[in-house]
Image (cartoon, rainbow, N blue to C red):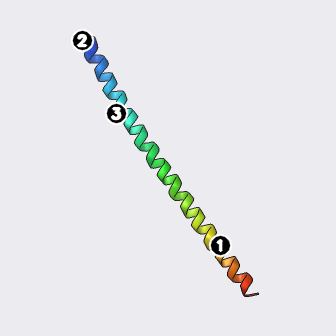
Amino acid sequence: MNRNGFIDGLLVILLCLNDTTQNERKKSEQRFQLHNLILVKNKARILMQLITIINNL
């Protein structure tokens, strides 16, 4: 294998790893956003329950 072929092979491997890293980062960000939405939903539900309790006093 000549030197240019070897370097091209390394570049392909690095590009593939970069794509994988970006995909994992996107998945992680999506999971984080979903987790935040769930937290907001839970907080809203608790707030509504508190409002209901206060209204019933």
Q: Secondary structure at mark 2?
A: loop
Location of residue 34 in the rendering, given as x and y in whole percent from the top left corner: 50, 58
Q: Secondary structure at mark 1?
A: helix
Calculate the distance from the C-alpha at mark 2 to the C-alpha at mark 1.
66 Å
- Quadrant into which the C terminus falls: bottom right
In the rendered image, which residue does mark 2 sit on? 2
Location of residue 42 in the rendering, given as x and y in whole percent from the top left corner: 60, 68
* Number of callouts: 3
Bin the neighbour count of mark 1 within 10 Å (Cα to Cα): few under 14, some 14-19, many 20 and up: few
Q: Earlier in the sequence, mark 2 or mark 1?
A: 2
Tell me which amino acid carries mark 3.
Cys
For the point 43% across and 43% down, which residue is it? 24
Q: Which residue extends farthest left? A: 1
Q: Is residue 8 above or below residue 47?
A: above
Tell me which amino acid carries mark 2.
Asn
Q: Secondary structure at mark 3?
A: helix
Q: Is residue 40 left or right of residue 9?
A: right
Q: Is residue 36 left or right of residue 21?
A: right
For the point 40% across and 43% down, which residue is it? 23
Q: In which quadrant of the rendered view does residue 10 lie?
A: top left
Q: Earlier in the sequence, mark 3 or mark 2?
A: 2
Calculate the distance from the C-alpha at mark 3 to the C-alpha at mark 2.
22 Å
Calculate the distance from the C-alpha at mark 3 to the C-alpha at mark 1.
45 Å
In the rendered image, which residue does mark 1 sit on? 46
Does the CB distance between marks 2 and 1 fall below 8 Å?
Answer: no
Does the CB distance between marks 3 and 2 fall below 8 Å?
Answer: no
In the rendered image, which residue does mark 3 sit on? 16
